[in-house]
Image (cartoon, helix red, strand yellow):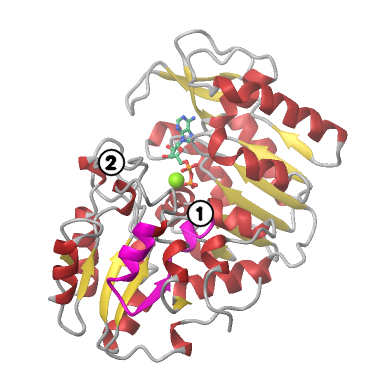
Amino acid sequence: MSKKKTIRDINLTGKTVLVRVDYNVPFRPGTTQISDDSRIQATLPTIRYLLERKCKVVLVSHQGRPNGQVVEEMRMKPVAERLSALLGINVIQAPGGVGSEVTRAVLALPPGGAAMLENIRFMPGEEKNDPKLAAELASLADVYVNDAFGTAHRAHASTEGVAHKLPAVAGLLMERELEMLGSALDPPKRPFTAIVGGAKVSDKSAVLDRLAQRVDAILIGGGMAATFLKANGLSVGSSPVEDERVASTAKFMDRIRFGNTSLLLPVDVVVADAFAEKAHHKTLSAEKIAHGWRIMDIGPETAALYELQIRKSQTVLWNGPMGVFEWEPFSHGTVRIAKALAGLKGATTVLGGGSTAEAVEKLGLASKMTHVSTGGGASLEFLEGRTLPGVAALLDA
Ligand code: ADP
Ligand code: MG
């Protein structure tokens, strides 16, 4: 991808600037309390740069997957409040995504003021990249800045469509992500290991397939391990399995077996009798999961095997926690992987994903990594060499 213009390359003084940010922050399970604000922190340099130049800053983000309708617990309110506290100014909460009242709120902003639009995925046009929504967003501002690296792999109205309707440049976070990810793995030092976990296979299956062609080993953890184990013919008890993914996962494993990439699955797991912090739990062989029990973490033998593979590696890419790390009894797998990466000397370690970054942040190990990306899927797609539509749409440098 060619180099892109950034906010440093154009004159922005006094302009109204629409800034796409990725404030899809993790909440404490079952609440709207932000458990990790690194994605907000990461955008502060861009926002401060604009405020210092007396811009009117209009922020737009999504949160969660409301699928085109208003979902109360996915409002941007807690994020706007946190951002206000971090910036030390009152970030106005616009009464919606677009529309006349939103336009009025933006017009009322003083130079050096900031407003945040409501969760843009409340609008059905966002994920459809509806040109009408893109035009309405564009009508709010003079310039568009994309600082949402984490969403740049999606061609949505606020990430791609709008970029064709205004002068469009990269923010400072976007610039840094592209530089860091671009240099870290070009070319990767080998052995090259990818660690993939997190909630669901469906989030990552496309990426897994293409990663498998580049890396020497893939280590699987998280909730998605259940789908892999089931595809391998094991019983996974009451673990949620994406049934429609079992056949494609089995095929994926077959393809891997014929290639040069090794695939490691959990050999033991921590299971619980409910999805709860205080649920009864135990560690057992991945072959012995009984009905009524569900996988919550990788077990210690698995962690030891994964540590061995990590210690052999010169490049490690990690996306997705190994277990429900937010709850202490199910955090050990993720902690061991994070420590193994932090302990590597001279290797390149690149992490992506909101929860993965949160886990490493919590352990105070982020500074031991080569790069902690704010993007999960976006960082993986970029590292596979795919064009990110949200980046491609920006002006070339
Ligand atoms: P990232 O944000 O790093 O890209 P994901 O969004 O894919 O990662 O997944 C993160 C979530 O996956 C975390 O909230 C974690 O609790 C959850 N998770 C991990 N392992 C399991 C599991 N075994 N069962 C249910 N959820 C899990
Ligand atoms: Mg996530």
Q: Is residue 2 left or right of residue 83?
A: right
Could you give the CA–CA distance between mark 2 and mark 1, rounded to whole angstroms?
Answer: 19 Å
Judged from the image, the secondary structure of the residue bearing numbered disc 2 is loop
Q: Between 113 and 45, which is closer to the camera in this rendering?
A: 113
Q: Residues within 10 Å of mark 2 (few under 14, many from 20)?
A: few
Which stretch appears magenta?
A: 132-155
Residue 68 placed where, x, y %?
33, 43
Q: Is residue 347 left or right of residue 338?
A: right
- Earlier-in-chain disc, 2 versus 1: 2
Residue 342 visible = no
Under mark 1, the amino acid is Arg
- Whether residue 251 is situated above or below residue 375 in the rendered picture: above
Residue 32 placed where, x, y %?
23, 44
Q: Between 14 and 323, which is closer to the camera in this rendering?
A: 14
- Whether residue 82 is situated above or below residue 49 in the rendered picture: above
Q: Which mark is residue 154?
A: 1
Residue where numbered disc 2 is placed:
69
Q: Between 129 and 348, which is closer to the camera in this rendering?
A: 129
Under mark 2, the amino acid is Gln
